[in-house]
Image (cartoon, helix red, strand yellow):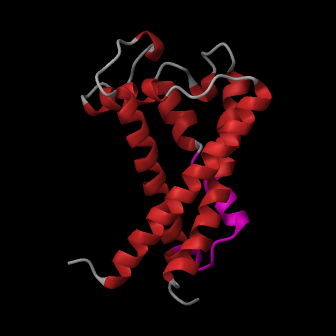
Amino acid sequence: MMPAASFRLALCAIITAAVAATTADAGRFVYQAISGMAPVNWSVSGRWFLMVLSGQPFVPDMAAAPALPHELLAGHAAYYTISLVFAAAYLLLLDRVWKHPPSLLNGLAFGWVTMIFPFFIQMPAMGMGVFASHTATPLLIVLRTLVHHSSFGLGLALGAMAAGRIMGPWHRAA
């Protein structure tokens, strides 16, 4: 059975991840409306995650890869799972390393650190290059990622603050 503190932290991570993902989606939506950029195609992301799970982490041209069953569902599942993992990591860092309550500044900083994943792992593995350098619109994609992860980081802080109000203190006293 899960100890009460771990259960409380897990519930706070779920609340934090939900707020962060929603905030990130809103930021990305606003950016796309302003820039005219097409929405993220979660099917392509899902296809890549399914290919990673089947042992093929590098795909030279993700857009040319054949569609896979349930790739849209896989894309959304991966997005929310990663949001949950990042939220739990943020809460644990706050509690065990930084020993500070959530703030917009530490949430934003954490959101920026999470850009390592798309810029240096996901984009290159999908054949897009580092910083989307092998695409037709690298600057737009980099800016969308910056807006998305900045919004995500701010959402992490807001979600952690909300979780603390809803669940009571989840962190150790400083």
Q: Where is residue 7 in the image (x, y as percent from the top left)?
A: 34, 76
- Residue at 28% x, 23% y: name it: 69
Quadrant where the N terminus sits is: bottom left
* Residue 112 visible within the image: no
Please provide percent x and percent y for residue 86: 49, 56
Q: Residue furthest bottom?
A: 173
Provide residue 38's location: percent of width, then percent of height: 64, 22
Q: Point out the stretch of residues depicted in magenta.
A: 97-114
Q: Where is residue 64 in the image (x, y as percent from the top left)?
A: 43, 9
**Is residue 103 found inside the magenta-colored segment of the image?**
yes
Q: Residue at (49%, 65%) from the top-left corner?
A: 15
Q: In this view, does 31 lie to the left or right of 133?
A: right
Picture layout, residue 50 above or below residue 84 = above
Seen as rendered, the residue at the extreme top is 64
The kind of secondary structure the magenta stretch mainly shows is: helix
Q: Residue at the left extreme?
A: 1
What is the quadrant of the C terminus in the image? Answer: bottom right
**Residue 84 drawn above or below residue 147:** below
Q: Can residue 172 be seen in this view?
A: yes
Q: Is residue 142 left or right of residue 10?
A: right
Q: Residue at x 37, y 34 (%)?
A: 73
Q: How many marks?
A: 0
Residue drawn at (41%, 34%) of the image: 75
Q: In this view, does 85 lie above or below 27?
A: below
Q: In which quarter of the image is residue 143?
A: top right
Residue 47 among those drawn in magenta: no
